[in-house]
Amino acid sequence: MKRLFSFLGGCGLLLTATFAFGELRIAPGDGPLQTHIDAAAPGSELILTEGLHIGSILIDKPLTLRGEPGAILDGEGNGDVIRISAPDVRIEGLTLRNSGFNLTDMNAGIHVEREAHRIHIENNVLENVAFGLWLWHLETPSVIGNRIAGNTGVRSQDRGDAIRLYNISGGTIADNDVRDSRDAIYVDTSRDLTFRNNRLRDSRFGIHYMFTHGGKIVGNHTSGTRAGYALMMSRDLEVVNNRSERDMNYGILMNYVNYSTIAGNDIRGITAWHGPGGSEHGVTLGAEGKALFIYNSQHNEIRGNRLADSEMGIHLTAGSENNRLYDNAFINNRQQVMYVATRHQEWSRDGRGNYWSDYLGWDLDGNGVGDTPYEPNDAVDRLLWRHPEARLLLHSPAVVALRWVQRQFPIFRAQGVRDSAPLMHAPSPGEALSLGEALSLGEAHS
């Protein structure tokens, strides 16, 4: 009899352990969700069934929280909808709504605390939350396939960022769809992150990069932002095969970005943003719409990009030297280049320059390269940049005569940008990518 009770007791413990480490389905009427989380063993999987569940929960152990179709977790306007303080947590398939809106407290749909390493957040929908995802001081997160929409009833400067990352090492942010946030993605003081195939719309910046090194920004698409890709104080980046379409002020902005590759990007239709009050979020409004703006950035390789249909193709300033620009296509920009300094800049490499839609030269030997150099700017342009009021005289006989003299007598030409091997046909975006980059793009689109 004693052996029988021992056997039955062992079976009971085995069943209890199996339940504790297995799946637990939770319906909206099954009591507070936090109680189930507190009772679950590490490694458990909690599945929320269809219906409305009440949020503001804390997950402090490794587990999976997954939603069946129609499962909604509502924070009721209090704090974070989900707060995570343990590593190896997975949040999947949920609709998260109604966080608090205290930006100082960093209220978020999902707030991931220090050392909650290897967090995996996939296929969730986040609505009416302050910050969408706040991740900080952790390693190798995965943020995949989420949809995040800001509250358009709140002023854009009072919204949080959709995906905010601080002091993150490694990890992948891919296939997310973000709109109507402050910054769609903001990353600061991090390293070795991959941003791939994200769709970022109607926000201040699409991807805002600060003090972050060694990252890959591949295959993303921005539109309706005030800067598609704002890359600042970073180095060793790979910015490849992205698209910026109908962004305002800047397509790609590089500020103190060094030793990076900007290749195969398609930047189109960048215009000035003429908004009320003259400035917003620190972005100067009413400025030129610049497809590519390079400020104090050096030793970068810029190739295979299409910069088209914008108010300005490229603007270099503040000591942006020693960059290599070739195999790019500058098409139908109102002004192709703005380079105020007078140091010589050669924009060709190994006999290949860039395509310029306003190039008026010829190719007598038929090798695909123009026989005369392309020089986009002259002394009159520099005069107008320094004294914009002089534009009133732009088409006056005196200015026309001055431009003619510069063309006829090269001694009067100031040093600046020169493309000694202009291309006669526009290369496709990405045509100049290396085999390694092409393979990485194949992975990005798979």
Image (tube, rainbow, N blue to C red):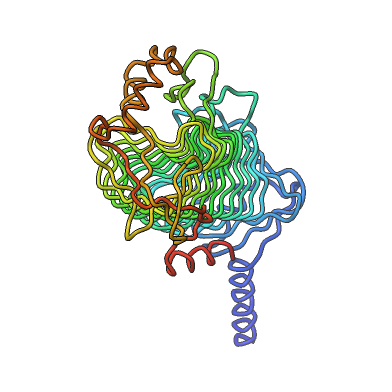
At 53% across and 39% down in the image, what residue appears? 184
In the image, residue 86 lies at what x, y percent?
45, 54
Q: Is residue 108 visible?
A: no
| 49 to 415, vertically: above or below | below
* Quarter of the rendering occupied by the N terminus: bottom right
At 48% across and 54% down in the image, what residue appears? 264
At 29% across and 52% down in the image, what residue appears? 259
* Quarter of the rendering occupied by the C terminus: bottom right
| 433 to 409, vertically: above or below | below
At 43% across and 45% down in the image, what residue appears? 165
Residue 358 or 272: which is nearer the viewer?
358
Q: How many marks?
A: 0
Residue 118 or 226: which is nearer the viewer?
226
Q: Is residue 94 visible?
A: yes
Residue 25 or 384: which is nearer the viewer?
384
In the image, residue 195 lies at what x, y percent?
48, 53
Left or right for 266, reference 325: right
| 294 to 404, vertically: above or below | below
* The image quarter in which residue 132 lies: top right
In the image, residue 216 lies at what x, y percent?
42, 55
Residue 21 or 76: which is nearer the viewer?
76
In the image, residue 422 lies at what x, y percent?
41, 50
